[in-house]
Image: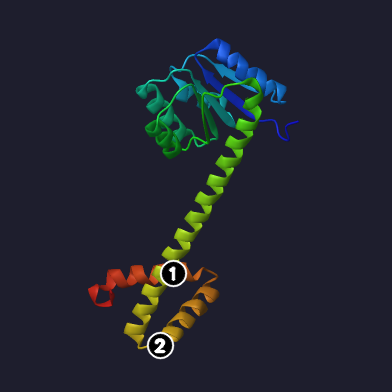
Amino acid sequence: MVRTALAVLVIDENRIRAAIIEAGLREAGHERVTVIHDVTGIARRIAEIEPDVIVIDLENPNRDMLENMFQLSRAVKRPIAMFVDRSDQASIEAAVDAGVSAYVVDGLRQERVKPILDMAVSRFNAFSRMARELEEVRGELESRKVIDRAKGILMKSRGLTEEAAYTLLRKTAMNQNRKISDIAQSLVTAAGLLGPAEDE
């Protein structure tokens, strides 16, 4: 059985194929399934429904239809499983770039729906976690750069060693109950306002 009740949105213009997907989802224990057959205004419908996972089935997609679905997948920030009957390398690469979590070519069968949906959710969660970690690392790197600039300013203006400059920044941060990077940013900003003499 499903651990949490996921809201699943199925987008499929072909009612027979949509019924296969819906049957596979319900057999897997998914009760909150919404099926949409008309892709007109799909972004608005997704916003209204707020699904946890989206399953898109494109029987014989043309290039424009694929691109529209890829744009949609970039915008919705949710796990997306996409079924297509045929594809080429460019479409597969575009699907990956667009963040489609599972791109299945010629594989629409009822018994495959659940494992593919599970994989799409797992892959989406893994990519989201990696993106958050990357953002944290970027933030830490940016903080280090600002702290290094602030140390340079203190070393130049007060004749301090690097260690003494860092100690002063740390002590000021502790006294003001703020992060060292915030104090460093304030110092760099102030130095920029006071003139180019303090800039690197």
- Asked whether the beta carbons under mark 2 and mark 1 sit within 8 Å of each other, the answer is no
Query: Quarter-wise, where is residue 67 in the image?
Result: top left
The residue that disc 1 covers is 144
Residue type indicated by callout 2: Thr
Q: Position of residue 82 (x, y in %)?
A: 51, 28
Between the residue at mark 2 and the residue at mark 1, the CA separation in whole angstroms equals 17 Å
Colour scheme of this structure image? rainbow
Q: Quadrant of the C terminus?
A: bottom left
Q: Is residue 104 above or below residue 167?
A: above
Of helix, strand and loop, which one carries label 1? helix
Residue 108 vs residue 183, the one in the foreground? 108
Residue type indicated by callout 1: Arg
Q: Which residue lies furthest to the right in this view?
A: 1
Q: Is residue 192 above or below residue 78?
A: below
In the image, which disc is placed on residue 23?
Answer: none
- The disc, 2 or 1, on the residue closer to the chain's N-terminal end is 1
Of helix, strand and loop, which one carries label 2? loop
The residue that disc 2 covers is 161
Residue 41 vs residue 127, the one in the foreground? 127
